[in-house]
Every structure is written in C-alpha cells, then in structure tokens.
Image (tube, rainbow, N blue to C red):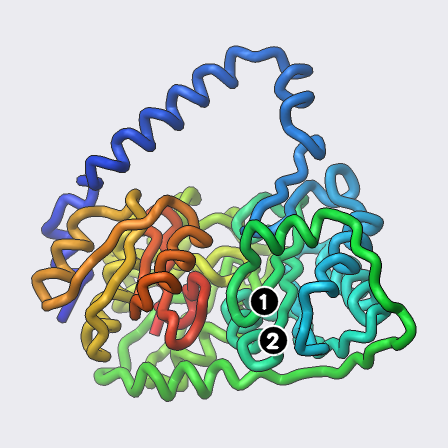
C-alpha cells in the first residue's frame, strides 16, 4: 500500500467545504490586523507576545517568558498532578536546560517526584507521561529558536481548557514535602518497534534532524526497524535550516533524498514530520497519508482528520475500508474528538502530524517515520 506513490498522482490541495469558510475567516482577520497600529495590536495581545493555550505556554525567552513565569506556571501545574509523579524533558533550544531545572524545582517543592528524561522529543515524553500520570516538555515546537515554552501533559494527553485555567491562575499548595528527582531512560524505541514491526528491503532513508530533539530517537528507531539511515543537520549549532520543516525549503534534504529511497525532516521537538521524495518536498498531508496507510495495515478503521487535511487522504482511507470524521483545526481539537469518539487514528494535515491513540495522544513524527 504505497501512499507516497499514489500522492504523486493526486491533487492534495482539495479541502472540505468547511475549511473554505475557516480559511476565509482567517484571511479576513489577517487583513484587519495588518491595518491596526502596532500599539493597538500589542494592547490586544494579553501577556505581550506570550501565548497561553491548551497547546502550551510560549514566548520569547527573556522577553515574554521569564524564569519567574516558569516558576509560577509549573507551581500551579502541580495542583493537577494526582499521581505524585511527573516526567520532564526539553528540546535543544539554548534556553531549554535553564528552564527545565527551574521547572523541576517548582514541581518538586510541591512534593511531586520528578523523573528527568533530559533532552528528548515531545512524543517520547507523552508516551512516558501515560505511565507516570503527568509530564512537562520544555519546548516551543516549530517556533523560532529564541522562543521557548511549557507543554503540560495529564494522563498522557495535553491539558484541556479547565486545566489551563488552573495553570495560569495562582494555586495554594501544601509545601510540607519536597519531591525527589530521578533520571529516567525511556523504552520508547523498543515499544514503537514492537508496534510497527520490521521493514522489509532495508530502505535507505535520509533523516534531517534540523538540530532538534529527534536526533536521539528517530535514527535509532529506523535502524532498529531495518532501515539504513543518513543523518543530516544533527546539531542545532550547524543546522542549515529553520526549526519548522513545513515552511522551510529543506534544500539539503532534497539533495540527499535523491541518493536515498526517501527523506524525512523533523521539527525541533519531533512531533512534526515532512517527507521529501526524489528531491521534491511533499505536502504535509502526505505525512498523514503515510500514517493512515500504516494504521490501515494494522487493522484500524476509525479516523479523525482536521478540516484542513486534504480530501485525498480521506478518499484513501475510505477506499481501504475506513471511516472518517472531521475535527476543528489544531492538535488539541483532533485529540478531543478522538477521545469522544474512541477513534483509532487521526491526522492534522497542515502540520504534518499523525496520531495513533493506542500509542500516543499527540502528533508523533517519530512513530510515523517508521
């Protein structure tokens, strides 16, 4: 079942009718905002440029986001941790280690035991958080390097709106006990390999890390599955591209993909994946299609797709016996509908994000690459 081959023949641009209304509303909003005075825009933006949402708290570190903010939000987050345990990790941004240590201290002061994963990709943290009850990732995902943020996880999923209010509003907590900190090694690679199974033919794969956290996991998983890998842009200090593979030209990977069977590009925290084939960067929808093809092979039939995902992906799923429901745009909205409908797989076309709920309640670019 070669979705990439099919996608080269399809027009991946068609979207559901509902998406047309969404896109028009976004265009209209942009037109009005662009006409505003900068001072007015800033006055309407709340915490300056800090973004507070169920997807996480993000901002330019040292400007919109400070260590004082980290202490506050992580202290409040502790009120949501009923298991008494929390896994913590960070991406490769220069500010991440400092923020991680501050976050760990804030959580431990409330009697929570912290399991420190160090520098590791977001999907790995989500996987471990299912076991420990809570998790925190220091990341700003695909945003520019000067940004950073906090992504909160409860019971293996991102926090909801009610839980966000707990995080951003001051909480009174019992500080009579200090939690312990332990190092933790993840079994993500072994668990993912067991689910995916061996890949026949020893395909050659160019892996563009983009200087991100996928570097410790993605090549290892692919090699364990039987692939041969050629890794590029492994370190952030000498990466030739930006943190968002969906918007970057991926010039290096285009070249390397022609010497390999396929190329994969990750964002800084490893939840997004973009495919390059024969020197051509594919639409993020192709990533969703690849995940859907594997999910169908595994016997899954119930899918959720965001409304900005190509109808060609929906067509592919239905032609192979699956059923599709549409969600609002955004990972949190996709996951919410997955949980409400007990769906077995999901995708967000605009971000190159595929979700397999049996394994993870988040976009998982690393799992999808297998």
Which image quadrant is residue 155 in? bottom right
The percent position of residue 123, horizontal first and vertical second, equals 50, 68
At 14% from the left edge and 44% from the top edge, which residue is drawn?
A: 11
Horizontal side, residue 122 vs residue 87: left or right:
left
**Image quadrant in which you'd find residue 301:** bottom left
Is label 2 in a helix, a strand or a loop? loop
Identify the mark at residue 154; answer none if there is no mark.
Answer: 1
Look at 66% across and 34% down and name the residue there: 49
Q: Residue at x 18, y 54 (%)?
A: 314
- Determine whether, in the image, residue 228 is placed left or right of residue 324: right
Determine the image quadrant of residue 150: bottom right
Q: From where the camera sits, is residue 154 visible? A: yes
Earlier sequence position, callout 1 versus callout 2: 2
Q: Which residue is mark 2?
A: 133
The residue sitting at the right extreme is 176
**Residue 238 image position (x, y, % from top left):** 60, 55
- Determine crowd level at label 1: few under 14, some 14-19, many 20+ residues with C-alpha closer than 10 A: many
Front-lying residue, 276 or 331: 331
- Counting from the top left corner in percent of width and height, residue 343 is at 30, 66
Rendered residue at 25%/31% (across/down): 20
Mark 2 neighbour density, 10 Å: few (under 14) some (14–19) many (20 or more): many
Quarter occupied by the N terminus: bottom left
């Amino acid at each position: 079942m070669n979705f990439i081959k099919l996608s080269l023949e399809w027009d991946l641009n068609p979207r559901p009718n509902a998406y047309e209304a969404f896109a028009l509303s976004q265009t209209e909003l942009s037109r009005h905002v662009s006409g505003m005075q900068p001072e007015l825009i800033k006055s309407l933006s709340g915490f300056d440029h800090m973004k507070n949402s169920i997807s996480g708290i993000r901002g330019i570190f040292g400007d919109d986001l400070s260590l004082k903010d980290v202490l506050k939000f992580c202290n409040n987050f502790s009120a949501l941790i009923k298991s008494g345990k929390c896994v913590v990790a960070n991406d490769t941004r220069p500010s991440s280690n400092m923020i991680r240590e501050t976050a760990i201290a804030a959580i431990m002061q409330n009697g929570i035991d912290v399991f420190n994963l160090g520098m590791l990709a977001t999907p790995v943290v989500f996987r471990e958080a299912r076991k420990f009850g809570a998790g925190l990732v220091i990341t700003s995902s695909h945003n520019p390097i000067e940004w950073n943020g906090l992504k909160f996880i409860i019971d293996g999923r991102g926090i909801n709106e009610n839980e966000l209010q707990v995080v951003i509003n001051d909480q009174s907590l019992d500080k009579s006990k200090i939690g312990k900190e332990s190092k933790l090694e993840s079994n993500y690679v072994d668990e993912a390999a067991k689910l995916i199974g061996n890949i026949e033919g020893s395909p050659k794969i160019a892996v563009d890390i983009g200087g991100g956290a996928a570097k410790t996991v993605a090549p290892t998983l692919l090699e364990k599955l039987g692939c041969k890998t050629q890794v590029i842009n492994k370190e952030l200090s000498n990466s030739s591209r930006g943190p968002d593979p969906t918007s970057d030209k991926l010039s290096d990977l285009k070249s390397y993909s022609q010497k390999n069977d396929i190329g994969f590009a990750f964002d800084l925290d490893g939840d997004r994946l973009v495919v390059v084939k024969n020197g051509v960067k594919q639409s993020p929808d192709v990533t969703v299609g690849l995940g859907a093809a594997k999910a169908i092979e595994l016997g899954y039939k119930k899918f959720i797709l965001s409304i900005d995902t190509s109808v060609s992906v929906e067509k592919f799923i239905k032609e192979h016996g699956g059923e599709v429901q549409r969600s609002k745009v955004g990972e949190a909205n996709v996951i919410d509908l997955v949980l409400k409908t007990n769906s077995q797989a999901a995708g967000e076309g605009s971000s190159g994000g595929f979700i397999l709920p049996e394994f993870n309640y988040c976009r998982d670019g690393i799992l999808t690459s297998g």
